């Protein structure tokens, strides 16, 4: 898991070997000085929190890259996360 405020958005593909995923902006919500983006990457949605002052600001439908630092990743077992796996669903 990566906290939403620890993910960065960019229109440009990362040039360094980073943790990254490409997706499309599928939702934007305004929360005061913070923007919450929903980025759809494949069949998954990621929540990303960015300061309202971020420039350039991605728009709905834009393709973006989400990146995060390795030290911001937290791993949990299914039991720790309280996840119940349905029969036939791959983890």
Image (spheres, rainbow, N blue to C red):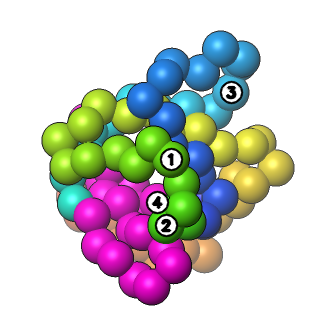
Q: Residues within 10 Å of mark 4 (few under 14, many from 20)?
A: many
Q: Which is closer to the viewer, label 3 or label 1?
A: 1
Magenta-drawn stretch contains 89: no
- Res. 55 mark: 1
* Pointer 2 with pointer 3, Cβ within 8 A: no
Q: Which residue is mark 2?
A: 52
Q: Which is closer to the viewer, label 3 or label 4?
A: 4
Q: Which residues are magenta?
A: 28-48
Q: Earlier in the sequence, mark 3 or mark 1?
A: 3
Q: Secondary structure at mark 1?
A: loop
* Pointer 4 with pointer 1, Cβ within 8 A: no
Structural distance between the alpha carbons of marks 3 and 1: 21 Å
Q: Secondary structure at mark 3?
A: loop
Structural distance between the alpha carbons of marks 2 and 4: 12 Å
- Res. 18 mark: 3
Q: Position of residue 14 (x, y in %)?
A: 59, 21
55 and 79: which one is in front?
55
Asked if residue 40 can be seen in this view, the reply is no
Relative side of 42 to 30, left or right: left
Structural distance between the alpha carbons of marks 3 and 4: 17 Å
Identity of the residue drawn at 36% across and 60% down: 37
Q: Secondary structure at mark 4?
A: strand
Q: Which residue is mark 4?
A: 48
Q: Position of residue 54 (x, y in %)?
A: 54, 54
């Amino acid at each position: 898991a990566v906290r939403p405020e620890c993910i960065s958005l960019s229109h440009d593909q990362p040039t360094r070997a980073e943790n990254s995923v490409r997706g499309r902006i599928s939702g934007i919500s305004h929360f005061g000085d913070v923007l919450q983006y929903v980025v759809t990457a494949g069949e998954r949605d990621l929540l990303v929190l960015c300061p309202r002052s971020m420039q350039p600001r991605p728009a709905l439908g834009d393709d973006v890259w989400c990146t995060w630092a390795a030290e911001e990743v937290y791993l949990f077992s299914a039991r720790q996360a309280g996840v119940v796996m349905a029969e036939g669903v791959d983890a």
